[in-house]
Amino acid sequence: QVQLVESGGGLVQAGGVLRLSCAASGSIDSFNMAWYRQAPGKQRELVAIITSGGNTNYVDSVKGRFSISRDNAKNTVYLQMNSLKPEDTAVYYCNANFRGTAMIYWGKGTLVTVSS
């Protein structure tokens, strides 16, 4: 079992930056790791993913602004968020998927609020 704890959320102005962290209770070496977000009144969406092999993908709306990375030695995944926009406001959730299987783990989320 893997427990995930997000941190780094907060209130920032448009154009600001935040770095989210997702700390896992154990090794994440064999997991695809991802960040999702859910804004008020909207469905949860995939923001960024980094596979166990280091491949990354992003939703179009954050390309060029967000960067996902992993530090397996620290059992931690990061989401660097630059040039934040009000539409980035959401609860951000960390996700771990064991080798693309149905074994999925979620963190409890961290709130990011971007003011106009």
Image: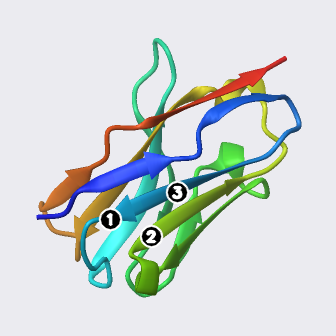
Residue 8: image location, x then y, percent: 59, 46
Q: Which residue is mark 1?
A: 24
| Mark 3 / mark 2, whichever is N-terminal | 3
Residue 62: image location, x then y, percent: 69, 48
> Mark 1: which secondary structure?
strand
Dividing the picture into quarters, in which one does residue 43 lie? top left
| Mark 1 / mark 2, whichever is N-terminal | 1
Name the residue located 12 percent from the left edge and 60 percent from the top edge.
102
Name the residue located 85 percent from the left edge and 29 percent from the top edge.
14
Looking at the rendered structure, the kind of residue marked 1 is Ala
Dividing the picture into quarters, in which one does residue 4 lie? bottom left
Q: Residue placed farthest to the top in the image?
A: 41
Residue 75: image location, x then y, percent: 38, 75
Q: Are the residues tagged 3 and 2 within 8 Å (C-beta)?
A: yes
Q: CA distance from mark 3 to mark 1?
A: 10 Å
Q: Are the residues tagged 3 and 1 within 8 Å (C-beta)?
A: no
Pointer 3: residues within 10 angstroms few (<14), some, or many (20+)? many
Q: Which residue is mark 3?
A: 21
Judged left or right of residue 95, residue 76 is right
Above or below, comparing residue 82 to residue 51 in the picture: above
Q: Are the residues tagged 1 and 2 within 8 Å (C-beta)?
A: yes
Looking at the rendered structure, the kind of residue marked 2 is Thr
> Mark 3: which secondary structure?
strand
Residue 25: image location, x then y, percent: 26, 66
> Mark 2: which secondary structure?
strand
Q: Which residue is mark 2?
A: 76
- For this rendering, which residue is in front, 62 or 28? 28
